[in-house]
Image (cartoon, rainbow, N blue to C red):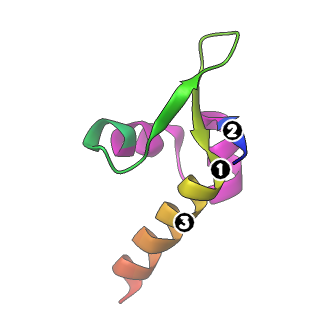
Amino acid sequence: MTLVDLYAASVRTGTKPATLRTWIHRGELTRRGYDDRGRVLVDLDEATALAEQKAATVSA
């Protein structure tokens, strides 16, 4: 598990941080805690998989 903040996850997945926050709020993406600056941390693999799943659903 690689924990990253929403901005790093955003760069990796090509998804806006606000969209990632929405997924967390909806329970689709798990918040894994906070870093020392208070930023939300997520599992990069989980965020990437969810972004790919959402992209496949939209293009299907």
Identify the element where label 1 is drawn. helix
Tag 2 near tag 1, CB within 8 Å: yes
Tag 3 near tag 2, CB within 8 Å: no
Q: Mark 2 sits on what residue?
A: 3
Q: Mark 1 sits on what residue?
A: 44
Q: Mark 3 sits on what residue?
A: 49
Q: Which amino acid type is shown beneath numbered disc 3?
A: Ala
Q: Quadrant of the C terminus?
A: bottom left
Residue drawn at x 55%, y 56% is 46
Whole-percent x, y for residue 6 in the image: 59, 36
Q: Is residue 16 part of the magenta span, yes or no?
A: yes
Q: Earlier in the sequence, mark 3 or mark 2?
A: 2
Left or right of residue 60, residue 34 in this image: right
Q: Which amino acid type is shown beneath numbered disc 2?
A: Leu
- The correct choice, above or below, for 27 with respect to 25 in the image is below
The alpha-carbon separation of the residues under discs 3 and 2 comes to 14 Å
- The correct choice, above or below, for 35 with respect to 31 in the image is above
Whole-percent x, y for residue 34 in the image: 59, 19
User: Which of 33 and 50 lies nearest the eye of the viewer?
Assistant: 33
Residue drawn at x 65%, y 50% is 44
- Magenta-tinted stretch: 5-23
- Residue 43 occupies quadrant: top right
Whole-percent x, y for residue 51 in the image: 50, 63
User: Which of 54 and 43 lies nearest the eye of the viewer?
Assistant: 43
The alpha-carbon separation of the residues under discs 1 and 3 comes to 9 Å
Tag 1 near tag 3, CB within 8 Å: no
Find the residue positioned furthest to the bottom. Answer: 60
